[in-house]
Image (cartoon, grey):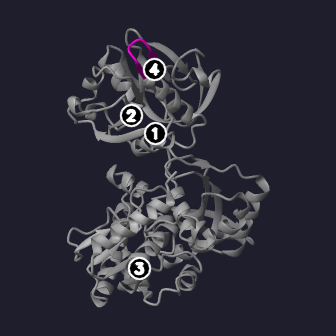
């Protein structure tokens, strides 16, 4: 069975990410972000949200494990920060209901949600500059980079929360990520 | 979704293993979480279980009577009138976290006393997953987690539904055959109406919150909200029958949610909103205004404190 491990950055919704994976029938576990990389046994990783990039533990090291990674909210910011992009305070915090325009209907992670999708967000900071190799895959009125992908390296990020009940097509994101992990 | 049959089997076994031959008390609030925990513990322990319901004076209208009726099948049920002790302890306290801690501590002390009397060594609680995540994240401390005093006089605390979300607890409630009233009951916070009156807890504010919450629950029944409530948020000027009133401001809140982790403020029609304000200001002379809270979660939480 495909095994996708959730790395806990102490976010409000970490446990819901586990639940979402469990609900689509994937084997899952939640591990702390201080876990040694060689102790992680997974076909894919979800980096959870959390309060601060300074408390993201060893998340940067998990990007080299050679398995697909989905960063959610802070998890996406960690990927951008580590790989040469930039994170900053947005002009406008993103809370609750946001409509995201999907840029590319072929994107493996969010393409199936095109042309637009209703999501639930909760963030003050955002990715303001993409790391090299990434393309922007979604944007909204309140946040320019709502999602990003680097399919060659299997690295993906969403600024919003596919795991919460109020995100309309959250389950599809996890299904798509499962397909990425299985291919 | 949780496999209810397997869950019930494992939870009952876990309670049996943890409590062994000892006695336990159950903290019963009448809400679905503690009711499920009680039913599971009753199945595991039978008459070695003493369910304790504490009437804190912070309960909803008619709540105590309803609990007495629903759980009358448990012979060992105890209803404790602790109303004055709680209001005394809360007197003069305005900080929301301190209010939560005082109520939490008060609960534990009541249970400790009843447990000693019932010769129980274990406390069973209906803590669910979102209670823990909010306490661990320092968003709000929940009475059955964060308010727990450092020195607890129990051998152990058993939390059989600690990994579940509210919707999953309801599934388990239905599988356990708990009546619909309990399984579908609207969530109600542990600290009760104390967190629906901003600032100091007084009898007058509690009465306003209690009557207004009752009105909101009744008037919005057709919307089938996840949670609907009224909170006393301050004072403002009004005019009633040509007399100036410096009365309470009642905020009405109604949300839909799956699990309480995120919530959407309900879109209510104008007529419903007007009926609510008319009923609340008309039946309570010390209420000057009614407002409707349109904020989702996040950025707000469902309750006010």
Up-down relation of residue A78 to residue B19 (above or below): above
| Residue carrying label 4 | A183
Dot 3, crowdedness within 10 Å: few (<14), some or many (≥20)? some
Q: Secondary structure at mark 2?
A: strand
Q: Nearer the viewer, mark 2 or mark 3?
A: 2
N-terminal of the two: label 2 or label 1? 2
**Does the magenta portion include A150?**
yes
Residue B69: x %, y % from top left:
57, 85
Could you tell me how far apart the alpha carbons at marks 1 and 3 are, in whole angstroms? 45 Å
B86 sits left or right of B299 in the view: left
Of the numbered discs 4 and 1, the one sitting upstream in the chain is: 1
Q: Earlier in the sequence, mark 4 or mark 2?
A: 2
Q: Is residue B209 left or right of residue A18?
A: right
- Mark 3 sits on what residue? B87
Marks 3 and 4, Cα distance to the nearest angstrom? 62 Å
CA gap, disc 2 to disc 3?
49 Å
Where A173 sits versus B266, above or below? above
Q: Please, what secondary structure does the residue beneath circle 1 have?
A: helix
Residue B260: % across, % down:
51, 53
Q: Which label sits on residue A4?
A: 2
Badge 1: chain ID: A
Mark 2, chain letter? A
Q: Are marks 2 and 3 on the same chain?
A: no
Q: Which residue bears the numbered disc 1?
A: A21
Q: Quadrant of residue B223?
A: bottom right
């Amino acid at each position: 069975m495909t095994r996708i491990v959730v790395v806990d950055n102490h976010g409000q919704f970490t446990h819901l990410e586990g639940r979402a994976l469990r609900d689509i029938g994937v084997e899952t576990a939640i591990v702390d972000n201080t876990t040694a990389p060689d102790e992680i046994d997974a076909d894919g990783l979800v980096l959870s949200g959390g309060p601060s990039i300074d408390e993201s533990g060893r998340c940067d090291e998990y990007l080299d494990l050679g398995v697909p990674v989905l960063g959610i909210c802070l998890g996406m910011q960690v990927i951008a920060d580590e790989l040469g992009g930039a994170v900053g305070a947005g002009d406008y915090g993103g809370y609750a209901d946001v409509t995201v325009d999907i840029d590319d209907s072929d994107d493996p992670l969010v393409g199936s949600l095109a042309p637009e999708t209703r999501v639930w967000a909760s963030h003050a900071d955002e990715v303001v500059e993409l790391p090299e190799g990434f393309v922007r895959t979604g944007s909204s009125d309140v946040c320019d980079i709502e999602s990003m992908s680097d399919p060659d390296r299997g690295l993906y990020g969403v600024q919003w929360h596919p795991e919460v009940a109020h995100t309309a097509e959250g389950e599809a994101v996890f299904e798509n990520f499962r397909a990425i992990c299985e291919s | 979704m949780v496999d209810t049959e397997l869950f019930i089997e494992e939870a009952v076994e876990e309670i049996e293993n943890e409590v062994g031959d000892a006695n336990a008390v159950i903290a019963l609030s009448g809400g679905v979480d503690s009711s499920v925990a009680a039913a599971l513990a009753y199945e595991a322990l039978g008459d070695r279980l003493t369910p304790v319901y504490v009437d804190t004076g912070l309960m909803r209208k008619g709540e105590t009577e309803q609990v007495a009726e629903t759980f009358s099948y448990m012979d060992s049920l105890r209803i404790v009138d602790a109303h004055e002790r709680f209001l005394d302890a809360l007197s003069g306290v305005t900080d929301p976290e301190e209010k939560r801690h005082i109520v939490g501590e008060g609960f534990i002390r009541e249970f400790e006393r009843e447990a000693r009397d019932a010769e129980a060594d274990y406390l069973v609680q209906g803590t669910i997953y979102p209670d823990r995540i909010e306490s661990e994240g320092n968003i709000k401390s929940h009475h059955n987690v964060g308010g727990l005093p450092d020195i607890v006089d129990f051998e152990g605390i058993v939390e059989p539904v600690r990994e579940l979300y509210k919707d999953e607890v309801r599934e388990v409630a239905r599988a356990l055959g708990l009546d619909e009233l309990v399984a579908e009951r609207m969530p109600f916070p542990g600290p009760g109406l104390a967190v629906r009156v901003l600032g100091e807890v007084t009898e007058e504010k509690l009465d306003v919150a209690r009557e207004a919450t009752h009105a909101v629950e009744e008037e919005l029944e057709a919307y089938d909200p996840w949670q609907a409530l009224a909170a006393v948020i301050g004072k403002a000027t009004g005019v009633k029958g040509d007399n100036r009133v410096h009365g309470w401001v009642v905020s009405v809140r109604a949300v839909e949610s799956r699990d309480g982790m995120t919530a959407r403020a309900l879109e209510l029609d104008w007529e419903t909103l007007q009926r609510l304000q008319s009923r609340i200001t008309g039946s309570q002379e010390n209420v000057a205004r009614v407002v409707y809270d349109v904020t989702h979660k996040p950025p707000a939480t469902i309750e006010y404190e």
